[in-house]
Amino acid sequence: MKNGWKLLISLLLPQLAAAAGAFFTISDPGSWYQSIRRPAWNPPGWVFGPVWTVLYVLMGISLFLIWKGARNSSLKRSAILLWSVQLFFNACWSPLFFGAHMIGTALVDLCVLWILVLLTIILFARMSRAAAWLLVPYIAWVSFAGFLNYSIYLLNR
């Protein structure tokens, strides 16, 4: 497969996960989220879209670097599988939190996601330092999101 197609697919996969999550945030116009207690340091809603857009692009480029460049095919397959599993857990968070209003379950999902992203970074680093570094802002944001989710959980239990 040509690198152009690999790049396109790599960039589209995270956007598909974003679209799945957006369905649950768009279908609830925010009334539930506005009604729950949130910490004072909760960012304004407009912050999340741009941040996630950048992170999804970085995730896609990171995947592309592994897909096109890694030579060890079994390690490459493992890395791409792990990246895909973390993307699945990423996509599950919005339906759990915004769709089902399951704040605690969404927090568990975020904890699993954080571990998967860390493992992905470690595995990617064995093949491409650049691919691993591109995921550092992602794990930083997932860490922040985890603290925010935990705070919301504590405030609303």
Image: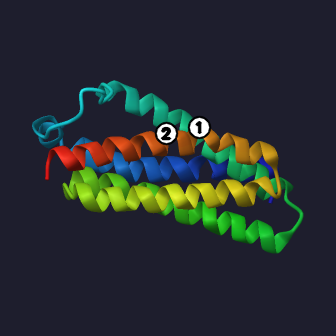
Give above or below for 53 relative to 24: above
Q: Residue furthest front?
A: 154
Residue 140 at what x, y percent from top left? 53, 40
Q: Residue at x 85, y 59 (%)?
A: 70
Residue 57 at what x, y percent from top left? 60, 39
Q: Is residue 5 visible?
A: no
Q: Residue furthest bottom?
A: 74
100 with respect to 113 (left or right) = left
Between 3 and 98, the one lying in front of the other is 98
How far apart in space, not on screen, are marks 1 and 2 (Cα)?
6 Å
Give above or below for 65 relative to 96: above
Q: Where, by quadrant of the figure, is residue 147 drawn? A: top left
Q: Dot 1, how many residues are within 10 Å of its Cα: few (below 14), some (14-19), or many (20+)?
A: some
15 with respect to 37 (left or right) = right
Q: Residue at x 82, y 54 (%)?
A: 68
Classify mark 2: helix, strand or loop: helix
Q: Residue furthest right?
A: 71
Quadrant that contains the N terminus: bottom right
Residue 96 at what x, y percent from top left? 28, 58
Q: Dot 2, how many residues are within 10 Å of its Cα: few (below 14), some (14-19), or many (20+)?
A: some
Residue 46 at what x, y percent from top left? 34, 25
**Which amino acid type is shown beneath numbered disc 2?**
Trp
**Which amino acid type is shown beneath numbered disc 1?**
Pro
Classify mark 1: helix, strand or loop: helix
Q: Which residue is mark 1?
A: 137
Q: Which mark is residue 141?
A: 2
Q: Is residue 108 visible?
A: yes
In the rendered structure, are the residues bearing label 1 and label 2 in contact, judged by CB atoms less than 8 Å apart? Answer: yes
Q: Residue at x 68, y 41 (%)?
A: 134
Give above or below for 72 relative to 150: below
Picture mark count: 2
